[in-house]
Amino acid sequence: TPTYCFSSGMAAVASLVLACSDVHMLMPLDVYHGLPTQLHSCLATHGVRHTAVDMTSLTAESLRQHCNHQGTLIVWLESPSNPMCQVTDIKGICKLVDETRATGAFPRTLTVVDSTWAPPCITRPLTLGADAVVHSATKFLGGHSDVLLGSVSCSPRTENGVWLKERLEQVQTSIGAVASPLECWLTLRGLRTLHLRAERQCQTAMKLSQFLDDHDEVAICHYPGRPSHPQHEIAKRQMIGPDGGNLYGGMLSFEVRSEAFAMAVAGGCRIIKRATSLGGTETLIEHRASIEPPERRVSPPGLLRVSVGLEEAADVINDLRTALDVAATVMKS
């Protein structure tokens, strides 16, 4: 599969957009905040337009409403989404786009999936019909919190995937946002253990989600592996590990009563580290709303995002249990 590596995940996104002309991006309501920030702050000055929609309930009618221009429509999917863990039916939306494209409603439409939270040993978007898949390899692919790299893989099976490959190669060569040799080597090192790390992270995430689901101080836990998750059945169909069993990812989020309580929980963790990245060997926790631009916040104020590492599941659960108890005590005083 043709894959191009860039100096970061956001450099990969920008290069993909630059490979197209007269771009209108259709993106999810719940999405990594760096994407709308890039669109607002940089790409909008180059005529790139974007609209946020609920990708979990996209219909042919709503898709056609955004197909009224003669440029390139990029249907951007993120599954699971950051930070609410929403799961998008990748195969279903790719089929929907193909059917709408067949009517001649618009000249060119690309389906692009940001699958950073579901690396290839969990979800393979190109086999589900996507034209391209984007990864921030800084996260799970590198896997050791020491890499800065982004990648775009273009489908050799779709007409638009082949078209994008030629354009993307030209952009990478001309713009120069290439990944360094060291970052590529470190990512290759990470890929050798990806499936082993992912299996352990998924197992621990499932146990942690069950603990959070049952805790009195937790309003809701967002994890695709829980039967109560609104898109659990979709996740069962498309989040499948190498052995055929389900792997629901190493990322989850949960909500507590208030922002102050969430901050107290994050501050009360000892084994779990408070940091913004994800996908590494250590378990990380972050209050997302506090780092998102105030005018474009997508995270609820009481939401905490957890990237599960390789520690013993019992140690992670006990650390979070203690932090929740400490936070409850602090809030009472």
Image (cartoon, helix red, strand yellow):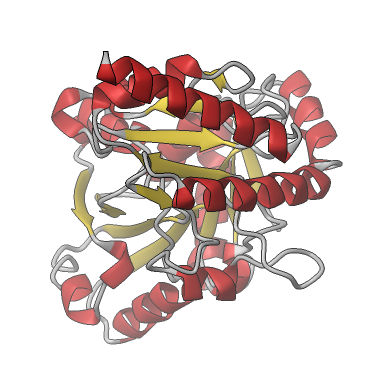
Q: Is residue 74 left or right of residue 204?
A: left
Name the foreground residue: 187 vs 268.
268
Residue at 73% from the left image edge and 47% from the top image edge: 198
Q: Is residue 248 visible?
A: yes
The x and y percentages for residue 138 are 62, 30
Name the foreground residue: 153 vs 234.
234
Name the foreground residue: 224 vs 164.
224
The x and y percentages for residue 315 are 70, 31
Give the position of the C terminus as an image quadrant.
Answer: top left
Across the whole image, how many numbered discs are drawn on residues?
0
Residue at 36% from the left image edge and 31% from the top image edge: 34
Q: Residue 165: which quarter of the image? A: bottom right
Q: Is residue 2 above or below residue 12?
A: below
Q: Is residue 49 above or below residue 128?
A: above
The x and y percentages for residue 229 are 42, 64
The x and y percentages for residue 317 are 61, 36
Give the position of the N terminus as an image quadrant.
Answer: bottom right
Q: Residue 47: which quarter of the image? A: top left
Residue at 29% from the left image edge and 81% from the top image edge: 100
